[in-house]
Image (cartoon, helix red, strand yellow):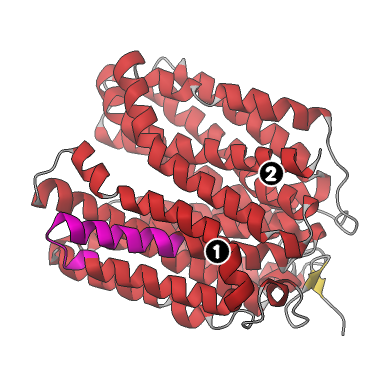
Amino acid sequence: MNRRWTLASSVAGAVVVALDGTVLTVAQPRLQRELGASFAEVQWTSTAYLIAVASLLVFAGRLGDRFGHRRMFALGMLGFGAVSAGVGLAPGVGWVVGLRAVQGVFGALLQPATLGMLRAAFPPEALAKPLAVRTAAIGLAAAAGPVVGGALVTSLGWRAAFFLNVLPALTFGLPALRRPERAAAGARSALDVPGAVLLAGTLACLVHALTARPVSWAGLVLAGAGAAVLVRHERRTACPLLPPGVVGSRAVGAALGVLVAVSAALFGTLFTAVYVLQRGLGLDPLAGALRALPLAVLMVASAALCPVLLRRLGARGTTAAATALLALGVLVLSQAASAPVFGGGFALLGAGFGTVMVAATHVVVTQAEAAAAGVAGGLQQTALNVGPALGVAAASTLQGAGTGPALLVLAAVAALGVPLACALSGAGGVASVTHGAEDRVRNGLPARR
């Protein structure tokens, strides 16, 4: 496949996943009413997917490194579309929950592959623009999802929302399946199945604990114990799931930390803002969504601008400034009382998050050679799944203290990303992001000097 088709496929995969989540949120009330489901059962239609996808992302990325990202993309895309159709035909809510978990497995195969294909197709110094296009498309999907979902559910019913994924799955999945690429040189090492099981169990416990209401402290303890066993195993095994050169890279660790911090702050803020707009100001869901529209607009615009900022400021300056901008947006929303102030706060959130998404993802993906790109992409996607769960858990826990204090805490969470951003490569532009000898990873191992 040529670079244009690879970019189009990567964007399509990312958009399908983004649309699926936003459309489901709109479809859930109608689904609950027509299937006679309880609130807890409807919540599990989201939770089952999130647990499955978050727990398998890194191992799925490793499978892409081992067997080819295009092959994993094809399997993930086609499986995602097929299971979506199955959800649309489900006779009861139990079937919906079970199929959503299966859909999460295919989503885990799909998401790291969308980044791995880009890393294989584009040289590191040319990756910023494709990543910007991908992030801008995700922003557009996030903005369009509620509108598209609302139109489908209103006119055709909740089942139609799940058939939306079928056509793009066939359009992009079948060509990728017919032309699988060879895995990168150096990616043929043995699979660390015990490590994959330990990581999946740890992340499943963590995500389930964070999505439970109230937060499950027992689940957090189990996740901590699982993480300790995983670290011990990875240090002793000959072919670790998490290559030392990837997880031991200061730049990769800092970029992942920034992604967790800003995504936690963003989604926790959005969770809180819904209550402020609908309960505090008495707005209906559509009016509330329109107040938040500047977020999507600025996310798209900032993603497009980010490659220029990376060339001029480097990863460190770009990410630190964007993270500070997002924290400022949360602070503005904590004091907002009028439409212009809300619009300004959401605009700052979008500008900050869109820029960080491109810049931090650029660091994570380019710091690994093609042989470890899938694991790097899986770690990036895991950060973007754990962060929102953490942010919403914090926001719901702090609701009793009031929306103002909750937003101040979330602003502090975002601000934690600023010192992390300072650990990234210096201000020498995109080249400094991609060619730093200190953190560069070669075939999953630190580069020799």
24 or 351: nearer the viewer: 351
**Label for residue 284?**
none
Q: Which residue is mark 1?
A: 306
Residue 216 at what x, y percent from top left? 34, 57
Which residue lies at the image location 9% right of the left edge and 50% below the top edge? 281
Range shown magenta: 333-353
In the image, taking residue 317 as reference, residue 276 lies left or right, namely: left
Res 97 visible: yes
1 or 2: tag closer to the N-terminus: 2
Q: Is residue 156 depicted above or below 385 in this figure?
A: above
| Membership of 335 in magenta stretch | yes
**SS assignment at label 2:** helix
Residue 332 horizontal side relative to residue 115, left or right: left
Instruction: State which quadrant residue 78 falls in.
Output: top right
- Determine whether the residue tagged by mark 1 lies in a helix, strand or loop: helix
260 falls in the magenta region: no
Amino acid type of the residue that numbered disc 1 sits on in the rendered structure: Cys
CA neighbours of label 1 inside 10 A, class few (<14), some (14 to 19), many (20+): many
Q: Quadrant of the C terminus?
A: bottom right
Mark 1 vs mark 2, CA separation in Å: 17 Å
Residue 284 in percent (x, y) is at: 15, 38
The amino acid marked with disc number 2 is Leu
Label disc, if present, on residue 7 of the rendered structure: 2
